[in-house]
Image: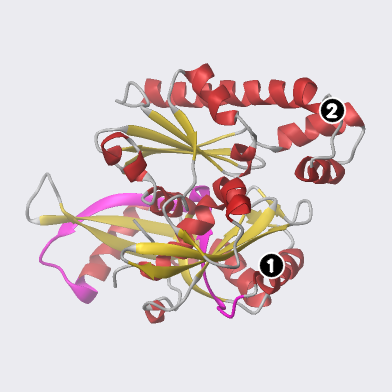
Amino acid sequence: MHLNINLDWLSANRLPILGLDISTTAVKLVELSDAGKGMLRVERYVIEPLPKDAVTDGNIANLDQVGETLRTAWKNLGSRVRNVAIALPSSAVITKKILAPASLKGLDLERQVETEANQVIPFSLDEVNLDFQVLGPSPASPDDVQILLAAARKEKVEERVAAAESAGLKALVLDVESFATQAAYEQIAHLLPNGGAGQTVAIIDIGAQNMHINVLHDNESVYLREHGFGGNQLNNEISRRYGMTSEEAENAKRKGTLPESYEVEVLQPYSETLAMEIGRALQLFTTSTQYRKVDQILLAGGGAMIAGIDEVVAQRTGTPTQVANPFANMAVGSKVRPQALTADAPSLFVACGLAMRRFDPQ
């Protein structure tokens, strides 16, 4: 499932594209190539930390800082590719499934979608970028097709495009983070029982401010939710305990220079709290939907990089849990250190899904 919103995306036909994820704490770039025999290769990737508050709640608050960081990231990546696929946070996009007569094509179909969009979108259509994708025949009525409608406020789209352009990059594709997550998940679904078929799988992307929960059933997304707990809570606790600023806490955590007592005093209690919050979030899912249990938890995002977090979550929730590595089945290029890639993989989940847009069937 993908989305393009009124960008110059038709020219993206098999062109090299970098996956660009602008998160709260970093910009991440991933370059994939075709390794042949149905395999992909990770050619390069980079994670460049953002200044504090440059991005808040999924919004670019300081365009200059984001552009500057992105310019540095692209330079450090060492790629010639300037085309990027970017994503909007799921919370910034309205998605609805609608029906349209299967006989409609081209402009007639577009007009029908616009008419339907007017009914379901709470903004004037002049204020939004609109896109749609035909999903296939409607199971309920054979004369209709199911269509996924997506709309985002123009300023949300424009701020991400502007950030890319200010760094000398060209945004060819716009996606939604939840769709990019699904694309990356498709790389690892085969590792699950029955390849994920008939399974209810919760992908928990642990960001700095929030956990993004995307639950798939039978490899289709059935539930999207944000839960207000993330990695910042760990940094806050480090700051409080050791008298550091949040930047010092983040640096010390990344470099492994925290006091010996850190693991027992701070990390273990945080991991337990995180596992408890995940348990709560999944309880909300099972009590508010028709699905009674989750068969598998996949942890992604920066918060999944804590050693042993999968075991703590599995124990607390009673659900098989693993840290998601979307590159597990890919070849690795000479510019990438495999050990570093494995460590960074969970935080590159969205960027990987975006980089895969290069291989979309046209």
Side of 161 where 249 appears, left or right: right
Where is residue 16? Give x, y as percent: 46, 76
Location of mark 1 (residue): 73
> Quick one: SS at disc 2?
loop
Q: Quadrant of residue 190?
A: top left
Which residue is depicted at the point 28% across and 50% down? 97
Where is residue 29? Give x, y as percent: 59, 63
Q: Is residue 105 above or below residue 199?
A: below
Q: Is residue 178 above or below residue 18?
A: above
Contact, mark 1 vs mark 2 (Cβ under 8 Å): no
What separation in Å lies between label 1 and label 2 (alpha carbons)?
32 Å
Asked whether 88 falls inside the magenta stretch, the response is yes
Q: Is residue 4 above or below residue 259?
A: below
Task: Count residues near mark 2 (Cα–Cα under 10 Å), then give few for <14, some for 14-19, many for 20+.
Answer: few
Q: Quadrant of the C terminus?
A: bottom left
Q: How many marks?
A: 2
Where is residue 17? Give x, y as percent: 48, 72
Which residue is depicted at the point 24% across and 34% down? 198
Asked whether 249 falls inside the magenta stretch, the response is no
Which residue is depicted at the point 27% across and 69% down? 110
Q: Quadrant of the N terminus?
A: bottom left
Query: Is any atom of residue 154 visible in this view?
Result: no
Q: Amino acid at mark 1?
A: Ala
Q: Give the magenta-colored segment's residue range.
A: 79-108
Query: Looking at the image, is mark 1 or mark 2 nearer the viewer?
Result: 2
Where is residue 77? Give x, y as percent: 65, 69
Which residue is nearer to you in this view: 172 or 307?
Answer: 307
| Precedes in sequence: disc 1 or disc 2 | 1
Query: Is any atom of residue 99 visible in this view?
Result: yes
Q: Amino acid at mark 2?
A: Glu
> Quick one: SS at disc 1?
helix
Location of mark 2 (residue): 260
